[in-house]
Image (spheres, rainbow, N blue to C red):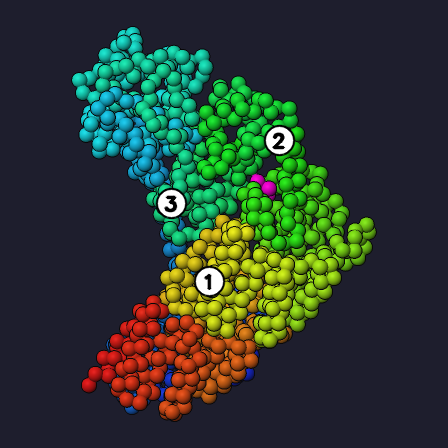
Amino acid sequence: MPKLSSSHAQTTNLSIVLDALRSIATNSSLPYPQGVASLAVEINRASAIHAANNEALDHLVTRVLELSWSIAGALQDTSSATSEGLVRAVGKFLNTLQNISDNLSLLPSRNRISRILRSSNETTAINNMEKDLDQCISSFVLESQFANLSLSSSIHENCIQYQDDFAATVSRIYSEQAELSRSQDQESQNDASFASILPPAPQVFFGRASAVTTIVQQLCLPEQSHAAILGPPGIGKTSVALATLQSPDIVSAFGDHRHFLSCDAFLDVESFLMGLGQYCHIDGKVTIARIAAKLTTRTRSLLVLDNFETPWEPASNRQKVEDILTSLADVANLRLLVTLRGAERPAGIAWKRPFLLPLPALDYDAAKQTFLAVSDVDENDLHLPKLLEELDNVPLAVILMANLCQDTSCEELLVRWQRDKTKMLTRGYDGRLSSVDISIEVSLSSERLNRVPLAMTVLQLVSLLPDGISEVETSKLLSGDVARLPPAMSVLRQTSLIYTDHGSDRVRSLAPIREYIQLHRPIGDDALCRLQSYFFKFTESMDEAGTFRDAEETQRIRSQLLNVFTVFLSAFESEVPSVEAIEATIRMGTFAESTGLSEKLLPLAIAAARKIGDPRLELDCINVGYGVSERGRSAAVYRADVERGLLALDNVKGASEQNLDLTRAASFRGLADCARLEGNLERAIQYSKDAIALYQKHQVYWRLADTWRHLAWTYDAAFEPKESRRALNEAIVIAETHNLPLIKAAIYDTQAYSYEEQGLLTLAEKACCEAIELHGQLTGESRSQAASLCTLGSILDGQGRLAEAQNAYLKSGQLFAKLGDTPNLTMLTRMMSGLALEQGDFELAKARAHAALRYYMEFGGPIHRALCILLVGDAELKSGNYSTAWAHISQARALFRVGGEIIWIFEAEALQRLGGATFGMQKRNDALNCYVVAALLCRRGSKRLLASKCIQGIGEVYLAQGDVDNARTCFMATLASIQYLGARRNIAECLLRLVDVAKDRDEARDFIRKASDWFQRAENQAGEVKCRERLAALIP
C-alpha cells in the first residue's frame, strides 16, 4: 500500500489507483473499504462528466483518489480490529466524500464548465471542498490512530495545531479554575475579618422552608420567645439560623437589632463570657450584668448563638454556661436563637413550644437542587441519585461533593467515594463547615459520649447497618451489656449520632458518620463475629422454593438487604474464609440483584470458595455472580470459568447427587445465556434442555420454569415462534401450578419482549407494566425492575410516545446507576440512541451509539458492537448520507455473522436498512432484493412491524419505477397490517406515502389530514411540518 507525501500526487499513476479502487469497490467483502472505494470512483466519474482542464478540480480529485486508496488499503489490513474510533473516523470520511460527490453533481456540464470555473465562486467552492477534505483527514488520523497514513505537511500542521489548541484550552480552564479558587479563598478571609457584620443568608438553600417559617413565627410573637436549632453534624443548622436571621419578617421585626455570634472558639465559661463582652464592645472587666445592659433595648432584639455546644457540652462548664444563657434570656425584649449539635436543649430556658425537631437530612428533591446549584451538572445525570444516596442527603456532604463535581463527573465521584469515603469531602480549610471529617470528629469527642463506653460499640454496630437496627435486635447482639443499652442509646440520640428512622423502630446513622466510623473507629472482632453470625442465621429464612408466598417474611428480608450484604462484605475481608458466609451469600442470590454491593460481594465469595478448595461452592458462586453481575462484560470469562468448574465438579467427593446436579443445571443455564449472546443459538438451546432435564429430575420448579422461559427467548431469536410459544407456555403452567410470583414477573418480561418483536405494542406494554409492578412487590428496586423499565421505554418509543419513553428510560438509568450496573447502563445508552433518532436529533443518536460502542469494544461481543454500528447507520440513513449508511449497515451485518451462524432477526433488520440505503443510492434492484428477502424472513418470524417497513419499502421502489398501482397496493397492505398495532409513527408515515398514489385531490387531502393527526400523536413535529407542506402544495 502506498505512503502519501506532498510529491506523491505528482508521480502516482492515477490509472493504477483507479484500477485498484475499482477492484476494491467490486470485489472487497469488507463494507468500509468497499464504501470508500465506491465513492472515490464515483467522484472521479462525476468530475470527468462535469469538468475538463481545471487545475483546482483535478488537484482535488487526485487527492481524493490517493487518500481513498490509502485509507481503503489500510481498512483492508485492519479488518479484524475495527475500533470505535475507526468507525467514527470512517463515517466522517465517507460523509466528506459523499458531500464532494454531491457538490460535483451540481456543477454544469463540460460545454460551459470552462467559463463557469473561471469565476471566483466556483474556485472558492472547490477550495472549500479541499479544505473539508484536509480537516477530515486530520480528524481521521487523530481518531483512528492509523500509523501507516503518511500525511502532507499541511495536514500534519493541522493535527499539531489541533492538539496545541486543545492543550491551550485545557490549560486555560485550569487557570480559570485556580483563579476562581484563589478569589474564593480571599473572599473567605475577608468575611472572617468582619466578625461584627451579620453574615449573609445562604445562597444555596433548599428544603428548609418549613423549619425557617416555624422559627420566624416563634421569634416574631409579641411575647418574648427563644428557639433552638438541633441536629447532627453537617446537617445545616447554621444555614437555617442565617436564613432565619435574614428573612424579611425578621429584618422587619428586629431591624438593626439582630446579632450573630459564633461560639465554636469558646471552649470554657471564661472564653464564652469574654467573647460575649468583646462582641458587645465592653472594655475592662466583663460581667453578665454589663453584657445584659448592652443588649437591653427599647425595641425587640435577636441574638443568634451559633455552635453553642462548644462551651455547653463539657459537664464542668454546663451549669455555669446555662446560668449565663438564662441571664441573657431574662434581658427585656431580647430573643435567643441557639444552634447546637445533638438533640438536647440547654436547661433553664423557657424554649418556645412546639419544639423544633432536630433537623433531618434533606429530602431527595432538595438535595438534588442543592447539588445542581453548586455543580451545574445535568439534572438528568443518571449517576446523581446514587451519589446523593451515598451521602444520605446530608447538606454539608452534598455541597462539598457538588464542589468536586464542577470539574469531575458524578460517575467518577462515585468511584472515588468507594475508595476515599469522607476524606474527599473537604475544601482544604481546617474547619467544621469545610470538612465532614472534622465535623464528625467534633461530635465523637463529646464528653457525654465518652462517659458511656457502650455507646461507641453501639455506634460501631449501627455503622455497619445502612438499613438500621431495632433496639430489640441490638440487645441480641450485645453480650452481657443489655442493661447498659438504654443509656448508650440515649446519649447517641442526644448527640444526634443516631436517629430513629421515620415510620419504623429502627435506629440509623447518617452515611458520612457510618463511613467515618468504619474507617477511623472500626468495630471490634468479638462484636463483629456476633453480628456476622446473626445475619448468617437470618438468611436461613430465605424461600428456597421460590414461592415468596409469605409477604411479611419477604418484606423483612428486603428491609435488611443492605445490612446483610454489608455484613457479608466484612466477613470476606477476614484472612480466614468462612463457609457460612459463602453459603449465606448463595442463599441470598435471588435478592443479590437488588443492591450494587453484590458487584463487590460475589467476586470475594468466589475467591473465598476457591481458597478453601470447594469446587461446588465456587461454581455456585460463579453462577450466582453471572446472574447479577456485569453480564455483557463477563460472558467469555464466565464460560471459561464454568467449563473449568464443571471438570473439577466430576472429582468432588462427599456432596450429594442432588447438590451436584443442581450446580450443573445452574451452570448449563448460564452457558445457554452465553451462547445466546454470542450468536450460537443451537448450542444455547441444547444447554437449556440439559438444564431443564436436571431441574425436572429434582423437581426444582422455580428454576425449571425460569429455564423454560429463557429457552422461549432463545427460540424467538432463532426465528422459531411456535417453539418459543410452546416453551413459554411450559413456564406459565409451572409458575401457575406452583404459585411462583418471581417467575411470573420474569415471564411477563419475556412476553413483553416477544409482543414487541411481533409488533403487538399494546399487549407488550400491558405485560411490561405487570412485570414492573410484580418486581417492585417482590425484590424492590432491582436490576430486573430496571430492565423492565428499559423495555417499557422501547415499547413506548415504538408507539411514538416519546416523552413517556424518555421518562421510562430515565427511571431505568437511575436504577442501573444506583446499582452500579455499567453494562446495563451501556445498553440503555444504546437504546436511547434509537430514541434520539425518533426525536430527530441524529447527532445525539450517533454520539450515544458511539459511546456504547466504545464500551463494547473492550467488554462486549460482536453482536453488541453490531447493534451500535447499526444505529450509526440508521442516523446516516435518516440524514440522507446513503453511501455512509450502506457501509455502516453492511459492517454491522458482517459482525452479526462473526460467530459463523446467521441470527435471522438481525439479518432481517440489516437487510431492511440496506434496502433504504441502496434505494437512496439509486440502486433500485438491489433495494428491492433487500426488502423482499427481509420481508420473507419477517414473515417466518412473525415480525409484523419490521415486515410492514419492508412492504412499504417495496412500494417505494415500485413508485420510483412509475408503477403506481403496485405501489398503492403495497402502501395499503402496509397500513392494513399496522393500523391496530399502536405504532403511531409508522401509521403516519404510511399515510403520507399514500398521498403520492391517491386517486384524487380529495383522497390526498384525507390522507394528509390523517397523517398529520398520527404524527401529532407520535410527537413528531417534523412529520407535522411535512403534512402542512404537502397540504399547501395541493391548493391550486
What's the residue at 70%, 42% (across, down)?
A: 580
* Residue situated in front as seen by the camera: 986 or 445: 986
Quick check: 261 left or right of 551?
A: left
Spatial CA distance of label 2 from label 1 is 44 Å
Task: Decide whether residue 564 is among the magenta residues.
Answer: yes
Q: Quadrant of the C terminus?
A: bottom left
Please state the horizontal and vertical placement of residue 34, each as a whole percent of the image.
50, 78
The residue shown at (60%, 68%) is 728
Q: Is residue 68 magenta?
A: no
Task: Please name the residue that numbered disc 1 is placed on.
Answer: 792
Can you tell which quarter of the image residue 569 is in?
top right
Q: Amino acid at mark 1?
A: Leu
3 or 2: mark nearer the eye: 2
For badge 3, the amino acid type reads Asp
Percent position of residue 868, x then y: 49, 66
Q: Is residue 897 visible?
A: no
Under circle 1, the secondary element is helix
**Residue 925 at least partly seen:** yes
